[in-house]
Image: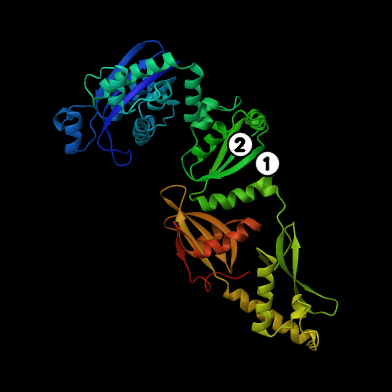
Amino acid sequence: MLYAITDIETTGSHASGNSIIEIGVVLHDGEKVIREFETLLDPGTRLPHFITSLTGITDDMLEPAPTFDQVADELEEIFENAVFVAHNVNFDYSFIKAEFNAIGRNFQMPRVCTLRLARKAFPGAPSYGLNNLCNWVGVVNETAHRALSDAKAAAEIFEKSLALLDEDVVRKMIGRASGDVFLPPNLDKKEFADLPEKAGVYYLLNDKGKPIYIGKAKNLKKRVKQHFTTNTDSKRNQAFMKEIYHISFELTGTELIALLLEDAEIRKHWPAYNSAQKRKTPRVNVVRYFDQQGYDRLAIQESNKIIAAHKTFPSHYTARNWLMYISKEFDIDMRLLGLTMFDIHRELPTPEIHNRVMDTALSELQSREPSFILQGEGRSEDEFSAIMVKNGQLKGYAFLPLDECSVEDIETSINVLPSTEVNASLIAMITEEHHGYIKITGLENSMSAE
């Protein structure tokens, strides 16, 4: 196994908005160093004073240096088929990944942290920072805070740690840090590598292309990797992994649309390894019907199945309160609303009179339900997403170019969602809470009621 033991110097402490100014790599085969690489890099901006003070690197030194894209090919050659190793590995890895992403290249490597490795190899050390650890274990770092010198120091710590630990310890650390080490045996590595780090719905498919698991994620790659690095020794998970042959996905722009689409897709395909949506959850419905005397009536009906309900509620209590409100607001006899314990001495109106009142009441209540569109991020920078709610009912979602934002455009492009207890329960939430969205209200006149 090859290990690319790496260190970088940067313009700041996080990859977002900062750049690499120096990189050093020591390629190690587990026994000895077989190659070294180092270079300064032009970040395209002036260095902060504290970085120059820390590293000794100046703007004049960086002026003739290559840019990252000019050394990317050589770095890819060095990193090929190797394990990425660094002290506090996520820091170095995140910068290099961001630099590759900035030039349109995917960067994905299994990785090991020498800081975590040293904690296992040298328990009781007063500090596991690179320089203090070097002093503790007797490693000489000739030029601290310079990339190649720090990489060489980390390489020596790596060698000393390997001498004290079983190889399985390192392999387990690699596996926990990188999903592709424990990829399903029948899955093409490229399909996992090509997963975007965006919101969407993913499909784990068997050898016949049928979904065996469907999930949603804010970050598709991160979520899918969790399937391959969590509970890997369980019997169920091992059987699951053997059945995975392909991964497909659909971008949704936002996590909320991913949640709605996931629910609809699970109910469409009923994948073998999904369980939550398969549990039969009682639905409290208010149904509308005509009795044998011709009365237009409402009644509460609980069911595990999806039925043609006039309105669905989270509990019997809320459904009953809604019916009592209708009775009081529109003076409708409670017996005709399924509340038979009330009004037993009151004479019922004729069906004709009652039905006119009932029809007026339900039409009025429907007109009071909110109609709006939640406008949010699209799947790419040149589009936006829209979730449409019409008279209190979730209709679906759409993706449109930024210059097509009329209600008519959205209605024409809508992806209709089936009525389920999941999206029904989201109505109240998205009516009041719409983080990350622009809520466009006052659409009742332009959105035709159904």
Label 2 neighbourhood size at 10 Å, few (<14), some (14-19), many (20+)?
Answer: many
Q: Secondary structure at mark 1?
A: loop
Provide the residue designation for mark 2. Answer: 204
Q: Is residue 393 left or right of residue 385?
A: right
- Any mark on residue 271, and which? 1
Q: Determine which quarter of the picture holds residue 204.
A: top right
From the top left corner, tell me how far across and down residue 10 is, in percent.
Answer: 26, 33
Find out whether the residues at labels 2 and 1 contact each other: C-beta distance under 8 Å: yes
From the top left corner, tell me how far across and down residue 357 is, in percent.
Answer: 70, 84
Does the image show residue 77? Answer: no
Q: Is residue 302 left or right of residue 386?
A: right
Q: Is residue 252 left or right of residue 213?
A: left
Please name the residue shown 25% across and 23% down the image. Answer: 39
Does the image show residue 85? Answer: yes
Which image quadrant: the N terminus?
A: top left
Q: Which residue is at the front of the view, 323 or 395?
A: 323
